[in-house]
Amino acid sequence: MWSVHGDGRRVRDGDQVAPNERLSWPLTIGLGLQHVAAMFGATVLVPALTGFPVTTTLLFSGVGTLLFLIITRNRVPSYLGSSFAFIAPLMATRDEGMAAQLGGVLTAGLLLMGVGVAVKALGVRLLDSVMPPVVTGAVVVLVGLNLAPTATQSFAKQPVVAVVTLATILVCGVARGLLSRVSILIGMLVGWAFAVFTDALSDDRVAALAAAPWFGLPELSGPQLRPSVVLLVIPVVIVLVAENAGHVKAVGTVTGRNLDGSVGDALIADGLATTLAGAGGGSGTTTYAENIGVMALTKVYSTATYAVAALTAILLSLVPKFGALVNTMPDGVLGGATLLLYGMIGLVGVRIWMANKVDFTDPVNQLVAAAAVVAGVGNLTITIGELTIEGIAWGSMFIVLAYPLLRWWRGRGDEVIVRRPRG
């Protein structure tokens, strides 16, 4: 599957290891473990926040990554980790039960696969026409900032631990090299260690850690479709489409290859991985930007390293004590990390606007984005009969439906002005 690059022991200056190449297996395994370190903090954080089993999420993360490599035919190096976009709707629906939440994840995966099939059939330009940057950016902003109260509440429960965690992430995050790529993981570990030394861990969770076995199968759960939950999760599909398309384009840029033809495959692969996760009890997945940073640093784009990372995640999923260990993570650590992470999610939406030069002097862009973002951030909640629809769904539905209508109305007005006779 992979040809050996050079002598397999080194990468010369100005050279790079292509996706279909690899270094020697010892080096490939080491680089694969480095990818595990880069994705680990974020992938584990999502189930820790939403209450999903950590080991189950790791299992579907690893399986999903292997499927991604197969479906994209080893052309797109990527790791599929837990998507932050699912945090807001899953936390908002915790009272509905895990089965209903999994139904939402399953639905999102199926819809993403459908988008992938359409893109593969009609071309990548379909995404630009259906989901222009002003729409995609607004949805990402409202999904990220909708979580802000949750972060501040966790922060306030253990402010000292939270400050230590946040300070460590900030110091590492502005450093150069690999340290910045794993800043979240390092910050969480430092905050966790500080909590241990200050006796800030939950006694019940520590007891559960001691009782957990070393080896065992992950906990599997089945989904249940519930309209109120599904409506909240559907907007996540827009975020996943943007993340996957952006990832493929970014990988194409750093490797010097045109990978636009693989966007549909990537969407289908991530959709399948998310569908399997929803069917079995794991968090929804997405491609990880953290791993692009590792590739840019090492100049090794080999998909073999991701196969190693995926197998490592699957092995970790067979250690229940590891899942119990993650469950001991204090509220202060989560608060310190999420205070930064949720804001970063929102800023990704702003970056989409900036990168695509979205013109906010245009009244259509300005008005629909403003209304959608406030509906999401303010968590506008309206009950219709027995169906409760919250801010993420309202904001996303509004901008997806209102933007093309208002754009058409604006264009119709311009056409009338142009055709009006003079004099």
Image (spheres, grey):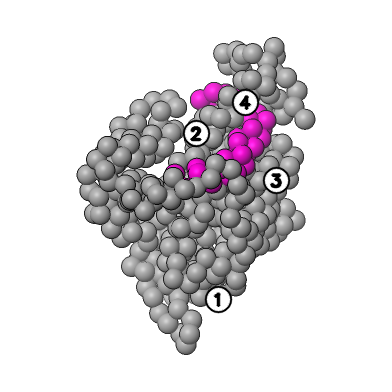
The reply to whether residue 21 is visible in this rendering is: yes
Q: To which residue does mark 2 refer?
A: 37
Task: Tell which of 243 and 322 is nearer to you.
Answer: 322
Q: Are marks 2 and 3 in contact (CB under 8 Å)?
A: no
Element under disc 2: helix
Relative vertical location of residue 257 with respect to residue 279 in this rendering, above or below: above
Q: Residue furthest right?
A: 1
Residue 219 relative to residue 322: left or right: right
**Which of the two labelled residues, at mark 2 and mark 3, occupies the earlier sequence position?**
2
Say which quadrant the C terminus sits in. Answer: bottom left
Between disc 2 and disc 1, the foreground one is: 2
Task: Tell which of 207 and 278 is nearer to you.
Answer: 207
Tag count in the figure? Answer: 4
The residues tagged by marks 2 and 4 sit, at their Cα atoms, a distance apart of: 13 Å
**Which of the two labelled residues, at mark 2 and mark 1, occupies the earlier sequence position?**
2
Q: Which residues are magenta?
A: 296-325
**Which of the two labelled residues, at mark 1 and mark 3, occupies the earlier sequence position?**
3
The residues tagged by marks 4 and 3 sit, at their Cα atoms, a distance apart of: 19 Å
Q: Residue furthest left?
A: 160
Q: Residue furthest front?
A: 211
Q: Residue at x 40, y 49 (%)?
A: 207
Q: To which residue does mark 3 refer?
A: 67
Amino acid type at image mark 3 = Leu
The residues tagged by marks 2 and 1 sit, at their Cα atoms, a distance apart of: 37 Å
Residue 294 relative to residue 145: left or right: right
